[in-house]
Image: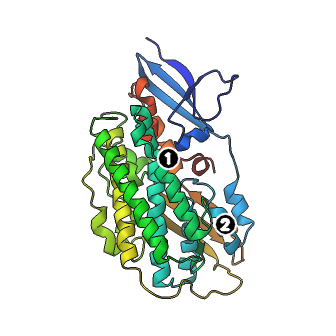
Amino acid sequence: MLPTTHAYRIGGITDPEFAGDTLDLGPAHPASAGMLDLAISASEGRITSVDPSPGALHRGAEPILTARDYRQALSLANRHDWQAPFFGEWALARLVEDALGVEVPVRARWVRAVLAEHTRVASHLAHLSFVGHRLRDATLDTTGVREDLRERTAELTGNRLHPMAVRLGGVACDVTPAWADAERATLARASELAARLGAALGGGLGAGVAPVTRAQVDAHGLAGPVARASGVATDLRRHPDRPGGHEAPWADLADLLDLDTPTTGDAHARFSQLAAEVTASAAMVDRLLDGLPDGPLRAHLPKVVKLPEGDWLAAVEAPLGRAGMVVTSRGEKTPWRLRLRTPSFANVSAWPAVLPGTAVADLDIALASLPWVAGDLDK
């Protein structure tokens, strides 16, 4: 049988003029924003080729960021990964701080770590919303816990979605005992839900679907849960000595990064990795709140911040993998050029290599397990 080509649109509003099918990954899944089309060739019920076509956004985030000074750019850097906006702020701040040799106060680093793991939980639960949708199990709905997490974000930072909590040299918000108590209660619910999601995955959802090899991890620059589910231990939180590696307090949390999860590289392993990381991140926040040190929240910087001439790089361990930023500076208060390196782009770039051989009936499982966010992809 000769291959046949069919068009799919992932999520979004149904378009009567679209000559294809809409893949529904669930109303709470990040893919529900739409803005990504696929041309799939298949033969005898299995995929032979995939051509993903982003392009509904083209927001021009990189040139827009070069029109702002480094302080102003912080409020825009969090607007491409809508599920984990904190990491955009953090990546830009780290780049500036590293370039200028700024020492961020210890308490500010710990508050950043709390926000990072809090956001990781929220992002992972968004992508795991597919599991309950696919299994038709309403008890696995992640919406309620995610809404509580947004409330905690708002209480701490003043904003539900885009926190704008990071400042060059520190943070603009501080943890209070009342907030810490509410956060612990919310994360306990998240951990309990993650445990139930993990148990549901024990039924084998995604087993053998779209395995990612170690060679594909290297070829496409994959990181985060996708790489770790293939047995590749890439995590900047483990390696503070590497370029872009995270500083303290991550060394005190290293034991929580050792997860007993499958490393078969298939969709089942990727979903299991996401669920296990929710529990681990919740435990990290609990430990961080217990040991939160006293001290200032921000280092002193000049009113006008200018980076030395040259190329500057920073990366952070975002929920979907390494989120990097490269700035070329000519010594001015705005970047001459800025480039984003996003995990969503890496994950989708791997689809044409990973998806061939997958049963068409399992396409939704494969795509949901290789996560992306539209703004993070088509930046």
| Location of residue 31 with respect to 47 vertically, above or below | below
User: Which residue has dot 2 on it?
Assistant: 75
Residue type for callout 2: Ser
Name the image quarter holding the N terminus: top left
Marker disc for residue 357: none
Residue type for callout 1: Thr
| Location of residue 94 with respect to 355 vertically, above or below | below
Lateral position of residue 276 relative to residue 245, left or right? left
Question: Which is closer to the viewer, label 2 or label 1?
Answer: 1
Q: Which residue occupies the extreme top position in the image? A: 1
User: Is residue 150 visible in this depiction of the protein?
Assistant: yes
Query: Disc 2 versus disc 1: distance between alpha carbons?
Result: 26 Å
Between residue 130 and residue 309, name the one nearer to us.
130
User: Which residue has dot 1 on it?
Assistant: 143
Indicate the secondary structure of the residue bearing disc 1.
Answer: helix
Lateral position of residue 201 relative to residue 333, left or right? left
| Location of residue 282 with respect to 205 vertically, above or below | below
Lateral position of residue 302 relative to residue 115, left or right? right
Q: For label 2, count other residues whose C-alpha is less than 10 Å away and answer few (under 14), some (14-19) or many (20+).
A: many
Residue 306 placement: quadrant: bottom right
